[in-house]
Amino acid sequence: MSALNKINSFFDKNYQTPTWLSHKFSRRRLLKSAAGATAIATLPALAFSQNEKDKLLETLQADPWLTLNAVLDHLLPESSSGPSAKQLNVVIYLYNVVYQQPTEKSEIDFIFKGVGWLNGYTQNQLQKTFTELSTVEKETMLRGISGSRAGENWLNNLLGYIFEAMLSPPAYGGNPKGMGWQWLEHQAGFPLPEVGQRYFELPKRSVAGDKSANNIIQSKDLLANKKLSTVKGSNKA
């Protein structure tokens, strides 16, 4: 049994920041320093059939994705100053991270368990799930969990994926038509990767972790025409 399975909430005093997350945050700080510290309204336009779009929409209308999408939308809401998480397709980018890219099982478990912990907290405090809350209530609840080490780590991890979706090539699911680059007035390098040429599809880097056959959408964009499966236990909140 992993240490994470023994944790029951964001406020469990037995929670310790895992090594994978410490390394991840360290890499982000390094990149930030080097750089000078400088959802579903639109689906990726990469060869989706209507049936594939319908399946994707259905998947994202149930937890854990329903709650994750609501959190992402709250962390980067619609604004006149720049694109939102919804416009950047952040939830689709995160979906690809979970089901397609070689992501550690422990990180996927943490992302999904956080959904259960968040809804448990909002139910205890307001007798509602997170998606049922008003904007003010969502802000209050997220600030509440951010006071814990696990809650702060969970939110920071999701914030990191918002920035990744904003800055990565559109082939990875986010940043449609380079929207994030245009907002930041950033010129991306060329040539940009296409489906079939993404880093995890290159030789010796395309093997993911443990797999099962739940809730995987076969589409040219999300799965690059390869039969890929979810990580065992990843459908648990």
Image (cartoon, rainbow, N blue to C red):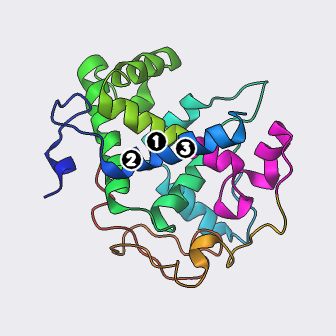
The numbered mark at residue 21 is: 2
The CA distance from mark 2 to mark 3 is: 11 Å
The CA distance from mark 3 to mark 1 is: 10 Å
Q: Amino acid at mark 3?
A: Arg
Q: Nearer the viewer, mark 3 or mark 1?
A: 3
Q: Is residue 129 magenta?
A: no
**Identity of the residue drawn at 48% across and 49% down:** 61
Residue 113 position, x and y percent, is: 30, 46
Q: Is residue 169 magenta?
A: yes
Q: Amino acid at mark 2?
A: Leu
- Assess whether mark 1 and mark 3 are in contact (beta carbons under 8 angstroms): no
Which comes sooner in the sequence, label 3 or label 1? Answer: 3
The numbered mark at residue 157 is: 1
Looking at the rendering, which quadrant does residue 143 occupy?
Answer: top left
Region in magenta: 161-188
Q: Which residue is mark 3?
A: 28
